[in-house]
Image: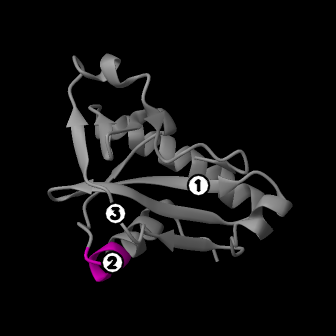
Amino acid sequence: MYPTFENATLEFQAFLAQQGWPPQVFWIRPEDARLRRRRINVRSMSRDVGEAHAREVYSRAVSARLGVMLEAVCRTGGLTFARVVRPIDEDASSRGLFPDGLKLSVPVSPLEATIASRWTWPLLAMANHWPLRDEDVVA
């Protein structure tokens, strides 16, 4: 029910393409995206940092067996910015409709993203986190 992270990513990429999203995935951490003036600003960072975080959250989700979701957050050009989400407990899993396995998600009304340079990122630090924080999940 839980594919390897690599196979889950391949399945997610196929799903993204079917939904009209760029299949190239750039994994982000919760602190890497901010909403300002209806635009998502994503912190410029190495792919390795985001992927290591995504793998860690995925691994913990598989161990907990409460479900895991690969979620598209926003997009720009040929990239989809995404995160791995897991519920914190059985109650959160049930309320969030997490199956015991893999769930894939894209927003109905996607927001476009801008990659913020390391010089402009500090100016965006006070903007709202995106997606908004949810106490029932770990991302």
Hey, what amino acid is under mark 2?
Ala
Any mark on residue 38, and which?
none
Q: Nearer the viewer, mark 1 or mark 3?
A: 3
Any mark on residue 85, and which?
1
| Magenta region | 15-20
Q: Secondary structure at mark 1?
A: strand
Quick check: 125 above or below 67?
above
Hey, what amino acid is under mark 1?
Val
Mark 1 surroundings: few (<14), some (14-19) or many (≥20) residues within 10 A:
many
User: Magenta span has 18?
Assistant: yes
Hey, what amino acid is under mark 3?
Pro
Q: Earlier in the sequence, mark 1 or mark 3?
A: 1
Quick check: 104 above or below 33?
below
Quick check: 118 above or below 52?
above
Q: Nearer the viewer, residue 68 or 137?
A: 137
Any mark on residue 110, and which?
3
Residue in the image at 22% along x and 17% along y: 119
Looking at the picture, how far across and down is residue 126, in whole percent?
44, 22
Q: Secondary structure at mark 3?
A: loop
Q: How far apart are labels 1 and 3 at the CA level?
A: 18 Å
Looking at the picture, how far across and down is residue 80, in whole percent?
29, 58
**Residue placed furthest toward the front:** 37
Looking at the picture, how far across and down is residue 11, in whole percent?
41, 75
Horizontally, residue 132 falls left or right of residue 67, namely: left
Name the main secondary structure of what is drawn in magenta: helix
Mark 2 surroundings: few (<14), some (14-19) or many (≥20) residues within 10 A:
some
Q: Are marks 1 and 3 in contact (CB under 8 Å)?
A: no
Name the quadrant containing residue 116: top left
Horizontally, residue 97 falls left or right of residue 28, namely: right
Q: Nearer the viewer, residue 74 or 83?
A: 74
Any mark on residue 14, and which?
2
